[in-house]
Amino acid sequence: MKKYALLASATLVLAFLIGRVHGHGDVQPQPVDIGNLELLGDEWRVTNPYVGNEEAIEIGASAYNQNCARCHGLQAISGGIAPDLRELPSDADGDEWYAMRVQNGVVRNGITYMPAFGELLGQEALWAIRAWLLTVAEDA
Ligand code: HEC
């Protein structure tokens, strides 16, 4: 009896580990309700239109938790898997780098380190996440 229990838990641990490996890069984006945020159209803005926008910050916090935290950490505190996004500069250069990364993701040598989110979430949700990230930024 005990042996079976042990085997069962070992199988569970294995399934969990395999799930994690597969889960990486293979995104299941969570739709984001952008509430009453101003719509931004198809063309990506160069800088964040929602800086300091309370509604955007609230939407961004939740969208971050659903779509980014599993790699970048809760509250944007990285556990080491992916860069700590609190360290991203808060200025226009930071906006540019952020927009480029979230739109295209990061693929190197055929390995997806980060999936492309531009089409999946849309720029409203992604700029809302950036607006929230600014509230925890190290240089804020
Ligand atoms: C599957 C894991 C994963 C998910 C999910 C993920 N990222 Fe990433 N992200 C990474 C990794 C890994 C890197 C570093 C890539 C590299 O090696 O350049 C990265 C890099 C970035 C960068 C560039 C940071 C820097 O310092 O250069 C930004 C910005 C970013 N991610 C934002 C986001 C946002 C916003 C979300 C949610 C919408 C998100 N990421 C979801 C794994 C992930």
Image (cartoon, grey):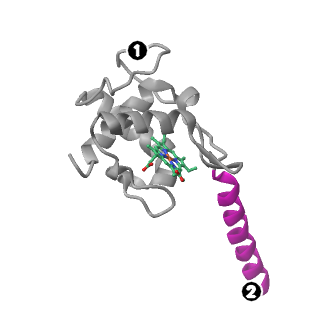
- Mark 1 lies on a secondary structure that is loop
Q: Residue at x 69, y 51 (%)?
A: 109
| Percent of width and height locating residue 44 | 45, 21
Q: Residue at x 58, y 29 (%)?
A: 120
Q: Which residue is mark 1?
A: 39
Taking depth in this image into account, of 129 and 63 the one nearest to the observer is: 129
| Percent of width and height locating residue 129 | 38, 36
The answer to which image quadrant residue 1 occupies is bottom right
Q: Residue at x 52, y 29 (%)?
A: 121
Q: Residue 24 bears which disc, if any?
A: none
| Percent of width and height locating residue 137 | 27, 48
- 12 part of magenta stretch: yes
Identity, as a three-letter code, of the amino acid under mark 1: Leu
Q: For the magenta stretch, what is the residue range?
A: 1-24
Q: Which residue is mark 2?
A: 2
Category of crowding for the residue at label 2, using alpha-carbon neighbours closer than 10 angstroms: few (below 14), some (14–19), many (at least 20): few
Say whether mark 2 is within 8 Å of ligand 1.
no
Residue 77 vertical position relative to residue 137 in the rendered view, above or below: below
Question: Total of numbered circles in the picture?
Answer: 2
